Image (spheres, rainbow, N blue to C red):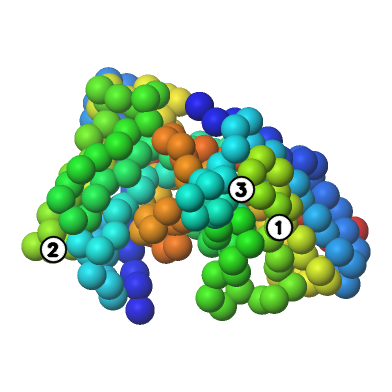
Amino acid sequence: QVHLVQSGAEVKKPGASVKVSCEASGYMFSNYGVSWVRQAPGQGLEWLGWISGYNGDTIYAQKFQGRVTMTTDTSTSTAYMELRSLISNDTGVYYCTRDRGSLDYWGQGTLVTVSS
Amino acid sequence: DVVMTQSPDSLAVSLGERATINCKSSQTVLYSSNNKSYLGWYQQKLGQPPRLLIYWASTRESGVPDRFTGGGSGTDFTLTISSLQAEDVAVYYCQQYYYTPHTFGQGTKLEIK
């Protein structure tokens, strides 16, 4: 069955960068995209962007343009999301999702805490 | 960005009763060429990732109980739970995936009365 397994929790200082990984299994990685969604503590869901599992094309939410980079390693069916210049408001749980338009499988989430 | 507005923000319903959540998009998410509305519904239980319930506004995801029904088209959508069960306590989100960014509604918290 389909699984998305994300890397562990991170604590970062303001201004630093974080890179979260998402290893996919149980399906053909190149047949789907991966979207990244985050959730601040006690808040709703926010879409950061999408990357093609086929050719690495990306679409980023304008809010994160210039600060986020999404990449894939097709040899290991792993997607990565790097967010730079972190501020306290970036604290939250970051999810990778299998994107077929709707988001049908979700990783377990990675808690990123930004604190001085 | 397309704004997704859910109502109500919270809802308390008795076990076995019907629960209805509304979602309105600021622009149509209906693609006329295939007559599909690019709208999904998700359920998030406490401490868990969201789970896809409904896609194309009204198609139930595999494994989702048939008490969950999605309806609507264009800009106005509903998620109905026909007979509320204790395990349905959660926050429910709609999301449009027609335009980027793929925006979510603010969420509706569903509780037992």
Q: Please rate how many residues cluster around mark 1, counting C-alpha atoms within 10 Å: few if below 14, some from 14 to 19, many from 20.
A: some
Q: Please rate how many residues cluster around mark 2, counting C-alpha atoms within 10 Å: few if below 14, some from 14 to 19, many from 20.
A: few
Element type where label 1 sits in the image:
strand
Instruction: Locate the N terminus of chain A and report the quarter of the image it occupies.
Output: bottom left
Q: Indicate the chain on which mark 1 is placed.
A: B
How many angstroms separate mark 3 from mark 1 (CA)?
12 Å
Q: Which residue in the structure is indicated by mark 1?
A: B71
Q: Is residue B112 above or below residue B28?
A: below
Instruction: Locate the C terminus of chain A and report the quarter of the image it occupies.
Output: top left
Which amino acid is tagged 3? Cys
Q: Residue at x 54, y 54 (%)?
A: B36
Q: Nearer the viewer, residue B110 or A113?
A: B110
Residues beneath discs 1 and 2 located on the same chain: no
Q: Could you say where residue A47 lies in the image, as x and y percent from the top left?
A: 44, 39
Q: Could you say where residue B22 lies in the image, as x and y percent from the top left?
A: 75, 46
Asked whether residue B42 appears in the rendered view, the answer is no
Which label sits on residue A76? 2
Asked whether residue B41 appears in the rendered view, the answer is yes
Which amino acid is tagged 2? Thr
Element type where label 3 sits in the image:
strand
Q: Which residue in the structure is indicated by mark 3?
A: B94
Which amino acid is tagged 1? Gly
Q: Residue at x 45, y 26 (%)?
A: A89
The number of numbered badges drawn on the structure is 3
Q: Earlier in the sequence, mark 3 or mark 1?
A: 1
Tell me, yes or no, whether the two marked residues, 3 and 1, touch with CB atoms within 8 Å: no
Residues beneath discs 3 and 1 located on the same chain: yes
